[in-house]
Image: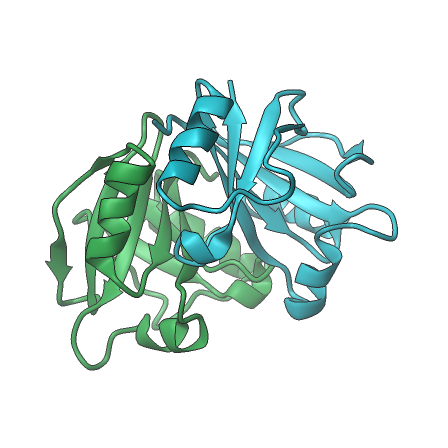
Chain colours: A cyan, B green
Amino acid sequence: MIGRLNHVAIAVPDLDAAAAQYATTLGAKVGAPQDEPDHGVTVIFIELPNTKIELLYPLGEDSPIKGFLDKNPSGGIHHLCYEVDDILAARDRLKDQGARVLGTGEPKIGAHGKPVLFLHPKDFNGCLIELEQV
Amino acid sequence: MIGRLNHVAIAVPDLDAAAAQYATTLGAKVGAPQDEPDHGVTVIFIELPNTKIELLYPLGEDSPIKGFLDKNPSGGIHHLCYEVDDILAARDRLKDQGARVLGTGEPKIGAHGKPVLFLHPKDFNGCLIELEQV
C-alpha cells in the first residue's frame, strides 16, 4: 500500500539557521521558505536526490508544532510522510486494522496541495505518519 | 555534499510486531531480521521504492538503543542516514564547520558493510545523523 517516502519533517527552533546549515555545512539544495497558514507552519524543503527533508517552524499562535518544540527545544524529527495512491482506500484499510486516524478522519489539503491524513503515533512505534495521495 | 537519504531508522519495542505491521497494515516490502552484534542491534529493512526504513531492536546488554527505548517506550525515529561519496572528506568539512562527530571520529563499518559516522544531534536540530559512504 505505501509507496515512496515523500519526506521526513524536522521541527527546528531557528528556520534560517537550519536552512543555512543544510545549504552550507551539509551542502544540500535548499528551497525558499513557504508559509502554510492552514497548517500553522512555515516550511522549507530540502531536495535530496531521492526524497525531501521538510524543515518546519511554527506559524501563528496555534501552530501544531509549538508543543513539540516546547518539549524538544533543540528540534527533532516530527513525522514521516508516505505516499499512497488512494487516500480514502488507505484510510479505510488502516481503520479496519485498528489504526487511529487523527482529526476528523477526512483528508486535508497538505503543503503540496494534495490530500493528506495523519496516523496516531502510538499505533506506529512512536512515529507520527502522514499519508499523502499522489 | 550529502546525497540520497539512505534510510530512516526507527527504534521499536517489538520487532516482530513492527515488521508485521509494515507488511500487513501498511503493505510494504519487509526483509528478514539481521543481527548486527558489532552495533548492538537487530535490524529489519523495509524497502520503499525510493529509500529504506530500518527497524532497530536492541541486541545484547550494551545496545546503544536500549536507553532510547527506555525514554521512548513506544519507540520512535532514531536517526536519519545520508549518503556521502567520501566519508573522510565529509567528516573534515563538518569538523571545520564546528559540527561534532560522535565516538573517536574514525568511521566504523555499518549495517550495509560500508563506512559510517554519526553526528551529534545537538548540532543538527535534535536529529541524530548517520553518514554512510557509498
For the question of whether residue B98 can be seen, the reply is no
Residue located at (24% from left, 38% from top): B23
> Which residue occupies the extreme front position in the image?
A96
Residue located at (71% from left, 62% from top): A67
A55 over B12 or under it: above or below:
above
Q: Give the left or right position of residue B4, taking residue B15 as reference.
A: right
Q: Give the left or right position of residue A107, taking residue A95 as reference.
A: right
In percent of width and height, residue B43 lies at 21, 55
For the question of whether residue A25 can be seen, the reply is yes
Residue A102: quadrant of the picture: top right
A87 over B129 or under it: above or below:
above
Q: A70 or A13, which lies in front?
A: A70
Residue located at (44% from left, 65% from top): B101
Which corner quadrant holds the N terminus of chain A?
A: top left
Residue A46: quadrant of the picture: top right
A17 over B3 or under it: above or below:
below
Residue B126: quadrant of the picture: bottom right
In percent of width and height, residue A34 lies at 77, 32
In percent of width and height, residue A74 lies at 65, 65
B91 over A51 or under it: above or below:
below
Q: A88 or A36, which lies in front?
A: A88
In percent of width and height, residue B11 lies at 34, 60
> Which residue occupies the extreme right position in the image?
A61
Q: Give the left or right position of residue A113, taking residue B39 as reference.
A: right
Residue located at (16% from left, 76% from top): B60
For the image, the number of numbered tags is 0
Q: A133 or B11, which lies in front?
A: A133
